[in-house]
Amino acid sequence: MTTINTAPFDAAEYLDSEEAIAAYLSAALEEDDPALFLAALADVAKARGMTQMAKDAGVGRESLYKALAPGAKPRYDTVLKLAKAAGVKFTVEPAHT
C-alpha cells in the first residue's frame, strides 16, 4: 500500500483578501455554531497577523487570544470590533423560511 504524506490544512493561508475573508466568515455564520464562527474569526486573525488584528480592533493581543480561544464566549462588542478589524461588517436580511 502506498503511503500518502499530507500537510495540515490552514485556512489562514487562503484568506488573502477582504472578499475571501467575508466569504469564509459568511459560510461559518451559516452553520449556526458560535464556536465554528469564532474558530473562523481566529483563522482570519492569524491571516491578518494577531498583533495587527489586536491593534486594529483596539484590544490587547492577550485579550484577542482569550476571546478566540476554544470555548471562549467573547462579548458582542468584541466580536464587532474584530469583524471591523478584519475588514467586514455584519448585515441583516430576511430569513428564507
Image: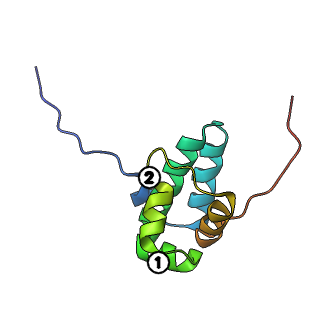
- In this view, the residue in front, 73 or 27, is 73
- Provide the secondary structure element on which disc 1 rests: helix
Image x and y of residue 8, in percent: 28, 45
Residue 10, horizontal then vertical, whole percent: 36, 51
Relative height, residue 65 to residue 94 (above, below): below
Task: Determine the image quadrant of residue 96.
Answer: top right
The residue labelled by disc 1 is 52
Per the rendering, the mark at residue 3 is none
Instruction: Tell whether label 2 touches label 1 (CB within 8 Å).
Output: no
State left or right for residue 38 relative to residue 5. Answer: right
Tell whether 1 sits left or right of 96: left
Q: Residues within 10 Å of mark 2 (few under 14, many from 20)?
A: some
Element class at badge 2: loop
Badge 2 amino acid: Ala
Q: Nearer the viewer, residue 62 or 41?
A: 62
Q: Position of residue 63 (x, y in %)?
A: 47, 67
- Residue that appears at 48% across and 44% down: 71
Residue 56: quadrant of the picture: bottom right
> 79 or 84: which is nearer to us?
79
Q: Could you tell me which residue is drawn at 42 percent across and 69 percent down?
A: 62
What is the residue that sits farthest to the top in this orientation? 1
Q: Residue at x 42, y 63 (%)?
A: 46
Q: Earlier in the sequence, mark 1 or mark 2?
A: 1
Up/down of 23 relative to 46, above or below:
above
Is residue 61 found left or right of 1 in the rendered image?
right
Amino acid identity at mark 1 = Gln
Quadrant for the C terminus in the image: top right
Residue in view at x 62 percent, y 64 percent: 78
- Can residue 70 be seen here? The reply is yes
Mark 1: few, some, or many residues within 10 Å (few <14, many ≥20)? some
What is the number of the mark on residue 69? 2
Position of the N terminus, as image quadrant, is: top left
